Amino acid sequence: MKKIFQLLFLTIGMFSFSSCGEDEYTDKEYAIPYSTENSTIPSTGGTVTFTVEGEGLTANADADWLTINVNGKTITATAPANPLRESRASHISVKAANGIIQLLSVVQSGLIAGPDTYNLRVSDNPDSYVVGMKADAKVTVKSLSDWISASINSSNDKIDVKVGSNNLREERIGKILFTCNDITDTLFITQDGMLFELETLTPTLYSNSATSRTIGVQHSKEVTVKSKSDWLTAAVVNNQIILNATANAEEVRIGYVEVTSGDVTETLAVGQFDWENGLKGNYYLHYASLSNGTNWQKMPVVLEDKSLYFNVRNGAGENYRMSIPIKMDNEAHTLEAGPCSSFIGKYVDVARGEMFIFFVFRSNPMYWSQYSADYSSYGDVSLEIKEDGSAGIRIDWSGTFAPAEYKIDAWALDAHRSIDRKASTRMGYVATYYFPYLEKVDSFE
C-alpha cells in the first residue's frame, strides 16, 4: 500500500511539472514583440504605425472606420475624421504565419466642436456680436429666426451674429443651428424687449384755462405723438411728452393722444377740468353692502370744500344729516377722507336709543379703527366716458392701516353710547360701505 501511494505522488508531480513547462512556452510564443511611437489618432483623422517582429503577418481591425495596411513588419492603421465628440477605440488582430495572434489597440480622439456659449443675451437695438468657438473641422451655421443672421469667419474660430431691432416690449428668443460633421448644436439668442413706459395713461389737466402738463416716458426707441383732439397738442422732448390744452368752456372733457414707439402704440386719455371749482358738487356714493363685493347700492352725497355730506335714515324713517371730513389740497390735487375715528354726528336708533357716530375704516382681516385713528382714506380722481358719451368724474378711495399694511376696502359708521369713544362704549356698526367710490352727477334721480 505504501508503494502505491508513492507511485501516485510521483505521477502527480510529473504532471505538475509538465504543465508549468507548457505555460511558459505558450507565453513566450504569444508575446510577439512590437513597437509604436503613438497609438492615438487625432479627431481630424490620421495614421498610426506599429512594427511587429513576426513573419508572414496579416492584420484586420474590429471597427469599420479603421483601415489596415501590412507592409512586411510594418502595420499602419488609418482613420478618417471622427464625426462625434466621443472618442472611439478598436483592436487590430495581427496573425503571424505560425498562427500566433497579437492584439494591438488604437484610440481616436473625439471631435472638438462647439461655441463658447450656447446662450447669448442682446439688447433690443440692432447690433453685431461675436461668439467664440473651437472646432477641429469645418463649421457651418444657419439662422432659424428671420431677425438673426449668422456666419463663420475665415479662421473658423468665431461666429459673427447680427440681430435686428426688437420693436415690442416682450423679449424674444431666436436660434442659430451650429453644425460640424455629425455634431449639431443650437445657439439661443435672447433679445431684450424695448423699453417703453409712460408715467400714466390718464393724465389730467386741473384747470379750465389754457394749460399744459408733462408726462414722463422712458424709451429705448424713438417716440412719436399724435393728438386726436383739436383742443390738445402734444410734443416729445427727450424723456417727456408735453401736453398743451386750450381753454375749456365745458365742465369736463377728455381728449386723446396716440404715443408710438417701435411697433407699440399707447393712447393717452387726457382729461381737463377745474379742480378747485369743478370737483365740488353732487355725487352718488356707490358701495357694495356685502364684504364679498356684491349687492351694490348707491346713495346721494354732496362734496364741498371740507366735507362730504349725506343723510342716514333710522328705523322710524327719520333722516340724520352727517358729514365726513374731506381735505382738498388744491396744489397737490389730492383728496383725503377722515381721519379715521372722526366724530360725524348723533343718531337715534329706535331700539338702541341715542348713539354717537364716528367715521371709521374696515378691512380684512378685521381691524377696529382704534389702531388707525390718525390715518385717512385717499381719493383717486379720474375722468371717464359715460354711457351717453359725456365725460364724468369718479373718485375711488383707498388707504392703509397701521402698524401693518392693510388696504382699506370699506368705510363704516361706528356707534358709541357717548362722545368718549372707547371699547367699553362701543355699540357696533350702523352702516358699512364696501369698496366705495363717488360718481359725479348733475342732479339726483
Image (tube, rainbow, N blue to C red):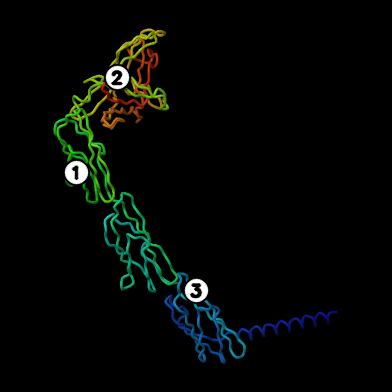
Q: Earlier in the sequence, mark 3 or mark 2?
A: 3
Query: Quadrant location of residue 111?
Result: bottom left
Real-space CA distance between mark 1 and mark 3, rounded to the nearest whole angstrom: 65 Å
Q: Which residue is mark 2?
A: 444
Residue type (three-letter) at the residue carrying disc 2:
Phe
The crowding category of the residue bearing disc 1, from other C-alpha atoms within 10 Å (few below 14, some 14 to 19, many at least 20), is some
Quadrant hosting residue 129: bottom left
Give the mark nearer the N terminus: 2 vs 1: 1
Left or right placement of residue 415 versus residue 108 in this view: left
Q: Residue at x 52, y 86 (%)?
A: 34
In percent of width and height, residue 164 lies at 29, 59
Q: Total of numbered circles in the picture?
A: 3
The residue at which mark 1 appears reads as: 240
Secondary element at tag 2: loop
Indicate the amino acid at tag 1: Gln
What residue is pinned by disc 3? Answer: 88
In the rendered image, the residue lying farthest to the right is 1
Q: In the image shown, does 177 or 295 lie closer to the viewer? A: 295
Q: Position of residue 55 (x, y in %)?
A: 56, 92
Query: Which label lies toward us, 1 or 3?
Result: 1
